[in-house]
Amino acid sequence: MIRLRKPLDFYQQQYGSATYGLDKMYLLMEKQRNRGQEGAGIACVKLNAEPGKDFMFRERAEGSSAIQDVFASVHRQITESDDNPFIGELYMGHLRYSTTGRSGLSYVHPFMRRNNFRSRNLAVCGNFNLTNIDTLFEMIAASGQHPRHGSDTFLLLEQLGHRLDMETEKLYHQARWLGNSTDITSYIEDNIQIENILRESAPYWDGGFVICGLTGSGESFMLRDPWGIRPAFYYIDENVAVSASERPVIQTAMNVQEADVHELEPGCALVVSKNGSYRVSRILPASEKKACSFERIYFSRGGDADIYQERKALGRNVAKKAIDAVDGDIENTVVSFIPNTAEVAFYGLTEAMNEHLNTLKAKRIANLGASPRLSEIEKILSAQVRAEKVAIKDVKLRTFISEGTLRDDLAAHVYDVSYGTVRAGKDNLIVIDDSIVRGTTLKQSVVRILSRLRPKRLVIVSSAPQIRYPDFYGIDMSTLDSLIAFKAAVELTIESGREHILTDVYEKCMAQAELPATEQKNHVCEIYSQFTDEQISNKIAELITPEDIEIDVRIVFQSLEGLRAACPEHTGDWYFSGRYPTPGGIRMLSKAYTDFYQHKKTNGGHA
């Protein structure tokens, strides 16, 4: 979000462009584009528009070129119109990466509701999933409204819009009572308290969220969930107020230092009024902070100073397991990474392996005695960790146009290898990944393509722990049976003749289905508790190794302790531990398990 805090003429004179705010919004969106975005949209509010002139604008597009398409359309409209659409004081932009629910242009943010009163117009967007949509739907319907859609974004728009209507109605009657009947519009717009709207709405939301909004009269807000699950940052100076979900994006776009960008506290809202003044207001009581650790491992861009160091630490913390997986034979091991998002963890891994090797070198030199030959010392010192870029992603290859076995065959060629980097049959190959979620890419592409190098042993290292539980707060891991760690635990349960445990867990989940979310418990953990981490890792290695691959494949995962040491301020680790920060998370987990169990039984397979 961008709020220009001075008249538009100032930016024309200062920067030589009437599109200063629009250009900054484009830069922010491009810099925050991470991966796989399926749509983009922007909204703009023009202050002090004359009656008969539009004051609120929106443009959205789908596809991988959505950002360019949106801004091309906007600039075309500016060129073709005398009314200067999209040249205003307030901007809000969003990149959509759907994690659950439906896709399509109508689901691309921002969402907008229109009204002839400027103060009742509202555009919202956000990064979130709510776990209690059904309850929210029933509440809105019970208030007399008629929700037309069941998605969380539509429901938030309905709920916030209803509260905005009530706030403006209250101010309307106040103005009449005070005798301001000739200038009611200004009274309403000058006295709206966005906090009132948020405090009446947000307590009903269960989930991780950063919700942003613009009103047609010039109010804007950004609200963060009370657990701090989703990240939010802002920068304000005398000319502009900027907010985004990632700190380095603001640093780059505004050319400011890390210390100039502030993190929005959990449960608080940054509110900018029509007159450009701002405040940070507490909307919800702060809960125990559970900032998402997966944002640090993978989802956020790695340019943030803290995230960079944390990802290096993740690589360092898994180094001992990686060394043990090759029986300590560092000198006959090649180390690499796949995909590029694991590159920073790779640096930490190789640094730690070099430190381990240096310790071995020192011991070997000490064992040479009091008068070692120079050649002996040089030979020992020449040993080093062999780091190579072994895997190369073919970004041109697309598999969506094919089906069936042909698609699988194409998927196996998404990556290519650097031939000659590994001595066939002699070298081990360690490849670090940022995380292993479903294992599909590993089985269909990575393991198969790396096996062409014929390493003595292939070790896949995950800088994240085993992902055992779905996410329900906005990252794309919302089903149990798609998680490779869950599949491994289920397979081990069946193989050990304890399939009744799967049924026991199902019955416990069903028994608590009607209980309030606050009284439900995580029973899925009982499936995992039967086995050690190593047993599950070994089964995962078996599951992701194609049957026709003969090389020795092993999987090494980060420990929970290693994760917490690397990311001490981001304790939201429910993906790995099952400790969901909100009651809705446990409720959704139980439902996910019952859905899995019933689907398996219905299809005649093992449950």
Image (cartoon, rainbow, N blue to C red):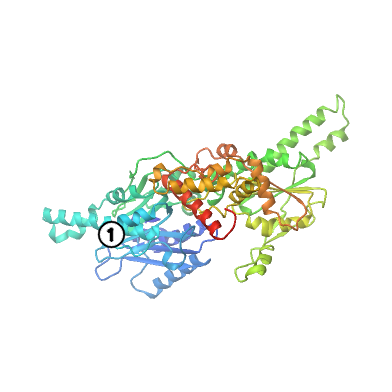
- Nearer the observer, 590 or 392: 590
- Quickly name the residue at label 1: 217
Position of 302 compared to 212: left or right? right
Relative image position of residue 184 (x, y in whole percent): 17, 59
Q: Residue at x 84, y 38 (%)?
A: 379
- Nearer the observer, 535 or 159: 535
Relative image position of residue 283 (x, y in whole percent): 33, 45
- Nearer the observer, 479 or 523: 523
Relative image position of residue 55 (x, y in whole percent): 31, 65
Q: Residue at x 25, y 58 (%)?
A: 165
Q: Residue reaching furthest bottom?
A: 80
Q: Examine the rendering and report whether any part of residue 256 can be seen.
A: no
Relative image position of residue 406 (x, y in whole percent): 67, 69
Decide: is 38 above or below 532: below
Q: Callout 1: few (<14), some (14-19), or many (20+) C-alpha neighbours within 10 Å?
A: many
- SS at circle 1: loop
Q: Residue reaching furthest top?
A: 370
